[in-house]
Amino acid sequence: MEYKKNLKKIWHFIWYDNSWLSWIVNVIIAFLLVKFIIYPGFGLILGTDFPVVAVVSSSMEHNSNFDKWWLDNELYYNKLGIKKEEFKEYSFHNGFNKGDIMVLVKPDKINKGDVIVYTTNKYKYPIIHRLILLDPLITKGDNNYKEDNENINKDAIIGKAVLRIPILGWVKIWFTEFLSIFGL
């Protein structure tokens, strides 16, 4: 009976108590649930160790409407044989922004124009760019003036973007910047 009484006290503390300590415990519980249950669960369902990523650079931003962006980039893509109509068929043809969250799946097949996330020895974090050539695998950020200067091994691809959630990635970016103040 004492066991049930203690459980009720804990339950009340977590869900109904308005103290700072209760708030801190709730944040810790939420973090643990996301880190060890929700995120790995999404990964299992989507077939990748990185089911969601926050966009931390502006390399895929278009900074305007598609037609204006295309006018600024038409010559580059035409050299690759990519016409405006073809590019408009690509996923995320309007780009996406720093601070967005991208949902990834493990790709069975990759196509020119797909937005992929891959790792490299050059950078600490994975890169999310558009695949512009298939043989060899070459990527480019839509907002960059040139392609990434490395060939990508298919084993380095950790996911293909399938869904964009605007703005929510800023939470991760701010949290990471906050932790960096303390050298973490």
Image (tube, grey):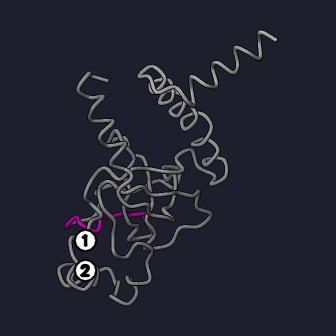
In what quadrant of the picture does the N terminus appear?
top right
**Span of residues in magenta:** 137-145
Q: Residues within 10 Å of mark 1 (few under 14, many from 20)?
A: many
Q: Which residue sits at x=60%, y=42%?
A: 38
Q: How many marks?
A: 2
Residue 94 point in image, percent of width and height? 34, 75
Q: Main secondary structure of the magenta part?
A: loop
In the rendered image, the quadrant that contains the C terminus is: top left
Q: Position of residue 179 (x, y in %)?
A: 30, 28
> CB of mark 1 within 8 Å of CB of mark 2?
yes
Amino acid marked by disc 1: His
Taking the spot 52% from the left edge, 55% from the top edge, the residue there is: 159
Rendering coords of residue 61 (x, y %): 26, 66
In the image, is residue 74 above or below residue 111? below
Depth check, front residue: 150 or 158: 158
Which of these two is toward me, 164 or 118? 164
Q: Which residue is mark 1?
A: 62
176 drawn magenta: no
Nearer to me, 10 or 170: 10
Residue topped by disc 2: 65
Q: CA distance from mark 1 to mark 2?
A: 7 Å
Q: Residues within 10 Å of mark 2 (few under 14, many from 20)?
A: few
* Farthest top residue in view: 2
